[in-house]
Image (spheres, rainbow, N blue to C red):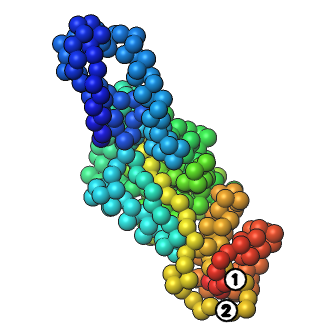
Amino acid sequence: MFVHVFPRQCLVCGVFDVLLVVTSFHFSMPSTKYACKCDYDAIESSNFQRFITAYTSMHTPPKEMQPIDNLVRKGLMNVEEGNEEYQFIKNGFLNGMGFMGHATNVMALYKNNVAFNLTRQARWDSFKIFYKAVAIKCGGDANVRYAWYGASLDELIEIVSFGFSGCNKNHDDDDECHGVGISLFSANCSIDSAMSTVADEHGLRHVLLCKVILGKVEAVPAGSKQSQPISKQYDTGVDDVSAPRRHIIWTAFMHSHIHPDYILSFKYNYMKDQQICGPLKPQSQYVSFPNLVAGVSNHLKPSQMSLLLKSYRIYKEQKTSREQWINKVRLIVGDRLLHSVITGSSHSVQLL
């Protein structure tokens, strides 16, 4: 918050006093305070309005701050970096990024302002009503969890403003989808949601952190076309009941069982040699897998990024050989892009 002091002459009585222009870091339009009794007339004055117009035109936020300004206008509140809430969500996100944690920088966090308008307040009230209903149905525990959803910033703003829709379908190929509905990823699996993000014009990526009413869950196999609970005792689906990574909220429940809470903005960065585990291989051009992900993320579709992550997990679980995995990476990424990323890297490190 900044206060700018300007001497001014009252446009009504001619008395000289001061004009205090109070500007917020997040808003382009300043609020004003006056010392003269003729304030109302001054505000109505066309001369004063011209002054404000000129002032705001000279204080347009820089390009890199425009996303913040836009999100605030859409009813989100910036959460300051030193805030405990910010640190808690940031740490949770980075922990869930796994091997990409050290190659990820959290840039900002925005909170959904449920009091922004009556519609948004109504959706929050509706979520609480369904929370109580599912809790009664399930013997007192509605099984509410946090879950991540990755997409473009425009899509996330649309969801915060109007809720999920049938357009927010899974980004995976058909054989990777677990039923027909809204797929979100567990709080400790933020890396999966990150694979579905799209970089904006500033190079930032964005994920949505939601409260989700899970109720009683059922396992839904990959490739399933299931679109509703198999019986009335179930509420939502998961890919694995014992260790859920993906939550499936059926389309019928997408407005009642999901509440968007935060938008987190992040970007990938290339890791330095000392941050990369594994032996160096001199006189050869290689790249670490985190750097590969960062390098190809702007060129591959979300479905391809998900396949790339899946191939890495299969390899790390020793379910495939290194040669088979590298061939799979080449198939997903393409030799031309892979060569471009490797030769464009400033590091010469083995692909882990």
Residue closer to the observer: 51 or 274: 51
> Residue at label 2?
281
Q: Which of the 4 image quarters holds residue 314?
A: bottom right
Residue at point 35%, 10% (across, down): 45
Q: Is residue 28 left or right of residue 1?
A: right
Residue at point 52%, 37% (across, down): 158
Residue kind at label 2, given as amino acid type:
Lys
Q: Secondary structure at mark 2?
A: loop
Q: Which of the 4 image quarters holds residue 17?
A: top left
> Residue at label 1?
286
Q: Secondary structure at mark 1?
A: loop
**Is 245 placed above or below 63 here?**
below
Mark 1 or 2, nearer chain start: 2
**Is 69 placed above or below 46 here?**
below
Q: Label 1 crowding class (10 Å Cα cut-off): few <14, some 14-19, many 20+?
A: many
The spot of residue 236 in percent (x, y) is: 47, 52
| C-beta proximity under 8 Å, tags 1 and 2 | yes
Q: Label 2 crowding class (10 Å Cα cut-off): few <14, some 14-19, many 20+?
A: few
Residue at point 27%, 25% (across, down): 7
Residue closer to the observer: 9 or 34: 9
**How far apart are the alpha carbons under marks 1 and 2?**
8 Å
Which quarter of the rendering shows the N terminus?
top left
Q: Is residue 139 left or right of residue 281?
A: left
The spot of residue 251 in percent (x, y) is: 54, 42
